[in-house]
Image: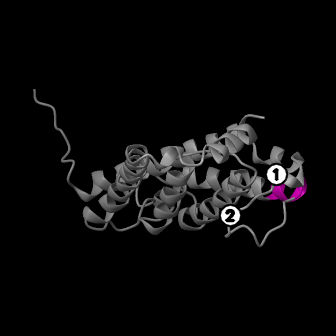
């Protein structure tokens, strides 16, 4: 008796793989946000608020504001994990997650991998990640695209990881990563204490 191994190059298997990656990614993203608890940052002194230019239009958020955005993130990421209203829920998860990680970074929280997570979070809503392994695909039969339509989000995510590691290694090789030791120490103290 021989076992039948499905062809991994078919659109069905590629769509299923992308759906599993979507669910695992948003589960990890949700776990990260629960772990870092961004609502606690509202209790920090206003003097520590040093936002990047994109967040400089905002004042330091209040506890109730961060709580509302966090609850929106938790609900939308739960829907994104399940694949329910996938495009909408993953877009809301990406936007609220970017804002919450931005708030944490504005208070000096140094988190290197959050930039890659943000890039991937904005890639997934543009893909067909809910064509299989989602509640959306169970509610209505979505036609499959070509296998390549399910590969590009995974490949682009891999490039994001490689780019992050390459730039970090390049900075260490050129010696620029220690050119501002006072700033590095300040960020470390903000993060640690």
Q: Nearer the viewer, residue 138 or 193?
A: 193
Q: Nearer the viewer, residue 171 or 168?
A: 171
- The residue furthest bottom is 57
Helix or strand or loop: what does disc 2 sit on? loop
- The residue furthest top is 1
What residue is rendered at 63% in x and 40% in y?
31
Helix or strand or loop: what does disc 1 sit on? helix
Whether residue 62 sits left or right of residue 156 in the image: it is right
**Numbered tag placed on residue 48 in the rendering:** 1
Distance between the Cα atoms at labels 1 and 2? 13 Å
Which image quadrant: the C terminus?
top right
Which image quadrant: the N terminus?
top left
Residue 112 drawn at (x, y percent): 55, 46
Residue 124 lies in magenta, yes or no?
A: no
Q: In the figure, residue 6 lies in which quadrant? A: top left
Q: Magenta region's main secondary structure?
A: helix
Whether residue 122 sits left or right of residue 43 in the image: it is left
What residue is rendered at 30% in x and 68% in y?
145
What residue is rendered at 25% in x and 61% in y?
147
Q: Which residues are magenta?
A: 62-68
Residue 87 vertical position relative to residue 190 in the rendered view, above or below: below
Residue 187 drawn at (x, y percent): 69, 44
Can the viewer see residue 176? yes
Asked if labels 2 and 1 touch by Cβ distance under 8 angstroms, the answer is no
Q: Nearer the viewer, residue 133 or 89?
A: 89
Residue 99 vertical position relative to residue 28 in the rendered view, above or below: below
Q: Which residue is mark 2?
A: 52
Which class describes the residues within 10 Å of circle 2: few (<14), some (14-19), or many (20+)?
few
Residue 180 drawn at (x, y percent): 59, 48
């Amino acid at each position: 008796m021989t076992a039948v191994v499905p062809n991994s190059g078919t659109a069905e298997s590629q769509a299923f793989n992308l759906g599993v990656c979507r669910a695992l990614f948003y589960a990890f993203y949700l776990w990260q946000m629960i772990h870092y608890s961004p609502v606690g940052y509202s209790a920090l002194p206003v003097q520590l608020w040093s936002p990047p230019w994109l967040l400089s239009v905002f004042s330091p958020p209040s506890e109730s504001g961060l709580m509302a955005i966090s609850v929106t993130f938790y609900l939308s990421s739960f829907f994104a994990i399940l694949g329910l209203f996938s495009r909408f829920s993953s877009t809301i998860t990406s936007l609220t997650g970017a804002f919450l990680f931005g708030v944490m970074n504005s208070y000096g929280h140094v988190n290197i991998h959050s930039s890659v997570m943000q890039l991937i979070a904005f890639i997934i809503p543009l893909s067909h990640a809910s064509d299989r392994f989602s509640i959306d695909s169970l509610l209505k039969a979505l036609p499959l695209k070509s296998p390549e339509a399910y590969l590009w989000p995974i490949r682009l995510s891999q490039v994001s990881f490689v780019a992050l590691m390459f730039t970090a290694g390049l900075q260490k090789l050129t010696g620029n990563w220690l050119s501002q030791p006072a700033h590095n120490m300040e960020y470390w103290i903000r993060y640690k204490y």
